[in-house]
Image: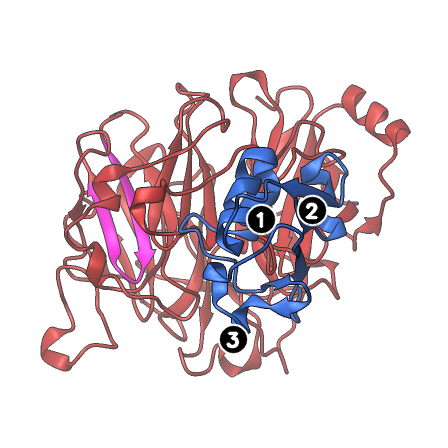
Chain colours: A blue, B red
Amino acid sequence: MITLELPNVLCSQNGERSSVLVDDTCRTVGDALRALSGRSPGAHDRIMDERGNVRRHVNVFVNGENIRFLNGLSTPVEGNATITVIAAVSGG
Amino acid sequence: MATATRRKSTSKTRSKTRKAAQEAIVLVGTMKGAFILRSDKSRKKWRMDGPHFKGEAVYALLHDTRGGRSRTYAAANSMHWGPTLRVSDDLGATWSAPADHAVRFPADAGRAVAQIWQIAAGRPTEPDVLYCGVEPSALFESRDGGESWQPNKGLLNHEHQPKWQPGGGGLCLHTIVFDPQNKQRMLVAMSTGGVYRSDDGGKSWRARNAGVRAQFMPEEHRYPEFGQCVHKVVHHPGRPGRLFLQNHWGLYRSDDWGDSWHDIANGVPSDFGFAMQMHPHDPDTVYIVPIEADVFRATPEAKLRVYRTRNAGQSWQPLTKGLPQHDAYENVLRDALAADSFDPAGIYFGTRSGKLFGSRDEGASWTELADGLPPIVCVKTGMVGAGAA
């Protein structure tokens, strides 16, 4: 299974859990994040906007690598991958 | 009025509030959260709590008492996690979850809501109707008290839409005005884009900017059909067809629901500005805060002055008692000037430097209610308790 790790601030959108297991039939990071919309739509909507883009100040890592420097949402994932969502360097 | 004291919100104080008589509330949206001030009807002493939505920009607030509710709406925008519409039925003691009340474009619109700039209650006769103006410019409507939201398709697909351009704050629809009698008529304003009016219940919209200047265009194109950077439009429900407009350079009045606009910058130090507020009881009285220039967004002559007309723009007078009159390089944004509905009316405004001022005598004198807040972007009022609805 693919593990999606969420930041603390989004746990309330995910039944107070900090991670979600996603079906390993997902081929890409985009597939895995879209799968989150069925499990935890509130968390999904905070990470991605209506156009399906990751929000500007959110970083997504696959096994520790930032997908902005890989292939974005098309970055491939394998069955045991860990996808980590972290707030980027910015704030209010 | 006196500077507000801080109040820690507890169930005990909330319980007392429910039993209390009529109270005035001032909702303050800042770049780092919202604050709620409360006072009794005298409005001499204020208690403040907050910040709500710590770290999030709150550009729009509304307290809605229609239909027997006492409901507060807040548009909270996290730099990381995006915009949300939050709802409280207990004056901010608790708020709805971020995922509820979602204001989102449909997937096929190809757009994403960047910010909610305005939350407007519909007509008193339609207590479940609310509107949101958002960035990028669009109008959302709810007919179930804010539970669900749909974009207005007439504006979403308007032929002018591809040519609307963002101003300094983004491409936003920030003003929503209704005809209280004619349910088919409403008006919106956006920066940039200008004023648009619908006479068929929102199905179609016509640009209504004749006479409004677009200073940033080549000289021969300074009065286009649309594309103006309108900052705010207000009117009085008792005389709805007469509108007042604060433009990005220009101060105007329309007596025909926006079909034509006429200059009323009579005796103001600058016709540039953002904020504009109608008097709650007098359709001839309007408040503004002139700003020196687009390239120097500060109060002229470093004096913080609210200007008031009592004759529908034929003349304007500065209101200065209690406001700093030297070294005051302040700016007051488009939604940061408000009036309550008491008599005499209370007038309130907040500055980009985090100062909140209030007047309980219609602007004749002012008191600093708070200082040191984050930059203030929104000030709204409400009333709770007996007789509020």
Residue for point 70% across, 26% down: B22
**Can you give x and y, in whole percent of width and height, for residue B283 in the image?**
37, 41
Question: Looking at the image, is B64 positioned above or below residue B192?
Answer: above
Residue for point 34% across, 53% down: B137
The residue that mark 1 highlights is A46
- The span shown in magenta is B185-197
The residue that mark 2 highlights is A10
Give whichever of A7, B60 is nearer the camera. A7
The residue that mark 3 highlights is B299
Give whichever of B339, B231 is nearer the camera. B231
Q: How many marks?
A: 3
Q: Nearer the viewer, mark 1 or mark 3?
A: 1
Labels 3 and 2 in the same subunit: no
Label 1 Cα crowd, 10 Å radius (few <14 / some 14-19 / many 20+): many
Question: Looking at the image, is A60 positioned above or below residue B146?
Answer: below
To which chain does the residue with label 2 belong? A
Kind of residue at disc 2: Leu
Question: Which residue in the rendered view is the most extreme toward the right?
Answer: B12
Please give left or right for residue B376 compared with residue B333 in the image. right
To which chain does the residue with label 1 belong? A
Residue for point 49% across, 65% down: A72
Label 3 Cα crowd, 10 Å radius (few <14 / some 14-19 / many 20+): many
Kind of residue at disc 3: Thr
